[in-house]
Image (cartoon, rainbow, N blue to C red):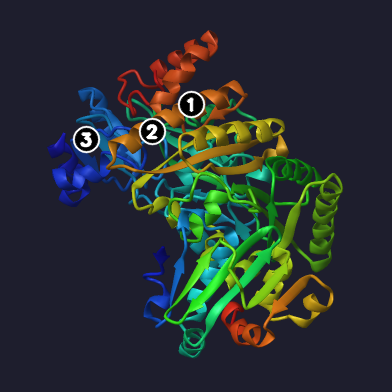
Amino acid sequence: MIPDTGSPSARSPVEVVLDDAPRMNLLGLLMRGLLVTNLAEPRLAARAAGLRGAIQVTAGRMGASLTFEGARIVVSTRPASGPRARVAGDMVALLDVVARRALLGPVLTGKVRLGGNPFFLLRLLPLIRTR
Amino acid sequence: MKQFLTDLLGAEGVLDEPARLAAYSEDQTEIEGGAPALVAFPTTTKQIQSIVHVAGQERTPITARVFGTNLGGLTVPSEGGLVLDLTRMNRVIDIDREDMVAVIEPGVSQRILKDRLTSEGIPLTLGYSLAPPDTSVFANALMGGLTNRSLKYGNQAEAISALEVVLSDGSLAQLGSWAVDGVPPFGRVPLPDLIGLFVGWQGTTGIATRMAFQLWPLHPLNRRLFFLTYTPRATFEAMRRLVRTEAVDDIGGLSWPSGKMMLGVPNPHPVLGDGEPTFFLYLDLTAEIPEEMAVKEKLVQRVIDGLRAEGERYEGPIDVSTLVKVNPAMGKFADFPTHLDFLTDHPGGGLTWIGTYGPLSRFTDAAVACGEIMMRAGLPPTIVSRPMRGGHYGVLRFVTVFDKKDPNDVARTRAVNRELLLELTNRGFLMYKTPVWAWNELKPRMDPGMLKLMGQVKHLMDPYRHFNPGKLGL
């Protein structure tokens, strides 16, 4: 696994690692970058450190999972087993959610589909949205 | 020679320490290096004239260079030769706002010219290559390189409207509209186009010392949009149709490995995973007023919707600002010039390519065939493509990063490059910024009349055979 060194999260108590980096897909790489940026903020790092479990994200036909293990977050292309939450949509809609902070509209129109534990999702959401 | 150069340039203008000369002996490619005996740093045309005259008398080979970022081994010097490092000739001599022309010296980089235009609030721009910001505008133009204005205006050589050159005997010639005293540098025509004797000749016919370089209007509104595509046909058919709207300033098709390397994976696996996009297509739109931008966006959408109706899949448009917000690494594609450090600063230190120009109609099949060549060699198919000159041709380039210290990796790179060159030539593409080994592959296929004429011109222009010897395989 490739950890993030030399990145903002290198100073964070939570490390972001890529599972099988040479095979990591675009979705996983974008999420990794977003997490690294956000985890430089101590408040968000503390939130991440307190999370346990996985979220499965699907953009179009690309899938990636984020597994929160306290001191690290593992980004993988392997489907998470028993994810606590799921988010799916096309890439454009997901980027809208992530970058524009809009959630209700894409969900109501069906462009983004949410599943699993809503509380886990709500706690996780600030970590995968731009600030 | 060393004493002559020291007398002419001062001690600070001459380099002969072996440790520092090493930096001039090779480039990032797999091409073998050559150790120069001396490096000289002239700052005036007169100095270059003197040097060329003396070097000719002494039959000393000269390699003129600026930043050495070309990937064709074109500034690798002859063993024991003289390198003329022109980076200290870096003046923007003049910018004519009305006729949209800049007069520049060889050492003017993309960054220098852009900074000058920006700092003076001049609403003009130049085309930027994907080479680092500290890359010579002058050199890229002389080699017919491409830029982000090539879709509209062709390769960068087509922006040269006048040129000053030092000939083999040290004399000076003014070409293009500078050929007639008092005429401003508006263009290469209508006089006989002798500027062509220095374009694409890879420094083997003389040394250019001043260039009049055409600039273009800078429009106040800009958008860069990305589309994710899932087949080569979707990529290149979109490219071809978008070109014909004449609404787009630049289109780039980058295959998936570029994106992954940009996002921090230096050695992506050669095989793409399920559901992943195969290309990133980016489009640049500029406009004077919002209404114009809206029309252009509508034209783009019409093309994409038409292709979707034919069964092709696109995700987008995605504004580059969104991508940069999500992952700051995407900022490398937010503005030009840019530093694609994931290529130039690759851990193995090696960067090479087979860059070709050819007809857009053949891009899809060529990209597929050459992508397979790379994958069979265990390399991710790193492709850069752009339409040029209104779609009459385009660039199709296959990039390899490798470990310069690993002989096996170097050998593999050479073998792949050779196979790519042959495949692309067979499909109607011609390599630009051509290394010597590629010239040697091409020559048997070239028209005897062309070769004869090249030889005659070369003999006329370089009777002492001291201008960058061998670089055209002649």
Q: Which residue was labeled with disc 3?
A: B35
> At 27% from the left edge and 38% from the top edge, which residue is drawn?
B83
Q: In the picture, which quadrant includes the C terminus of chain A?
A: bottom right
Question: Going by the image, does A108 lie left or right of B234?
Answer: right
Chain for numbered disc 3: B
| SS assignment at label 1 | helix
> At 69% from the left edge and 48% from the top edge, which residue is drawn?
B230
Q: Is residue B394 above or below residue B98?
A: above
Q: Position of residue B392 (x, y in %)?
A: 71, 34
Question: Going by the image, does A104 lie left or right of B329?
Answer: right
Q: Are marks 1 and 3 on the same chain?
A: yes
Q: Position of residue B322 (x, y in %)?
A: 65, 70
Measured in 3D between alpha carbons, the distance from the residue under mark 1 to the one under mark 3, in whole angstroms, is 29 Å
Q: Which residue was labeled with disc 1?
A: B419
Quarter of image, res B53: top left
Quarter of image, res B228: bottom right
Label located before the other in sequence (1 or 2) = 2
